[in-house]
Image (spheres, rainbow, N blue to C red):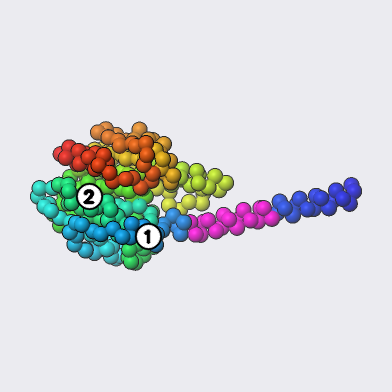
Amino acid sequence: MLKKDIKKMNYLAVILLTFILAYFLLLIFTYFFQRNLLYSPKVNSYEDDKILVNVEIVKIKTSDNIELISWHHNKSNKDYKTILFLHGNAGSLKNRIHKINHFKDMNINFLIIAWRGFSGNKGNPSEKGLYEDAKAAVRWLESNGVEKKNIIIYGESLGAAIAVEIAQNENFAGIILESPFTSMINVGKKKYPILPVKLLLKDKYQSDIKIKNIYSPILIMHGKVDNVVPFNMGEKMYELANTPKQNYFTEYDDHMMQYDEKLLNVLKKYINGLN
């Protein structure tokens, strides 16, 4: 073999080893810092929104002694149902003001909680931790006289996965899922096709399996131009859901759906139709 060929082979071997090392380092980085990629409490948008509905700031204690800052609006436990609003993976309670402002025009109470590690709360977010946060909110409502049959669980994006988890085999008034994904595994595979996502992922959020265990009336909302969670995941979740079920699929909405007149009419009709 010519020296020139040997030199070329050595050069290719160095490139291959460099690629393997870089890929290995990428796997290590992804594994240890994946929750920094998944949960984004410092993201801020809609910062100029002014809250137009009266809320009481409450603190809800979890079973592992974390206090969750939450906003509670109570028109009447006796006459109206209560929405438990579970927000997505980014931002604070203030980032949802543009949504909850519309609740003042509905015959509804609501409780919106901030996850551990969000909105100044202590703790670090994780799948197990966020499930406990949501369950703690349900317990808080029950301790304040709101039965599960009068609670509507509303999950936004990541919050939809948490809504699916806590709604399993329970008698809630209804379930609303906005821009839901089938599982974090599927989202990860789409976004990071070169990584062994299923092996690396700590927080899997397998909603496509769990939704079959929900028997409360369900409304699934999703926009066809969602650039974060593919619209076909919302379609799949609707397909897997048990009846009674409804959908609100739009041609123009991105990941955070527009709270326009059409969407609000769908919400009002759905809420008013619950037993």
Q: Which residue is mark 1?
A: 44
Residue 252: x and y in percent read 37, 39
**Earlier-in-chain disc, 1 versus 2:** 1
Mark 2 sits on what residue? 102
> Can you give x and y, in whole percent of width and height, for residue 257 in the image?
33, 45
| Residue in view at x 87 percent, y 50 percent | 4
The overriding secondary structure of the stretch rendered in magenta is helix
In this rendering, position of residue 119 left or right of residue 8: left
Which of the 4 quarters of the picture holds residue 28?
A: bottom right
**Nearer-the-camera pick, 206 or 116:** 116
Q: Residue furthest left?
A: 78
Q: Amino acid at mark 2?
A: His
Q: Answer left or right for 153 relative to 130.
A: left
* Chain part drawn in magenta: 18-34
- Check disc 1 and report its element: helix, strand or loop: loop
Tell which of 41 and 99 is nearer to you.
99
How many residues crowd around disc 1 within 10 Å: few (fewer than 14), some, or many (20 or more)? few
Q: SS class of the residue under badge 2?
A: helix
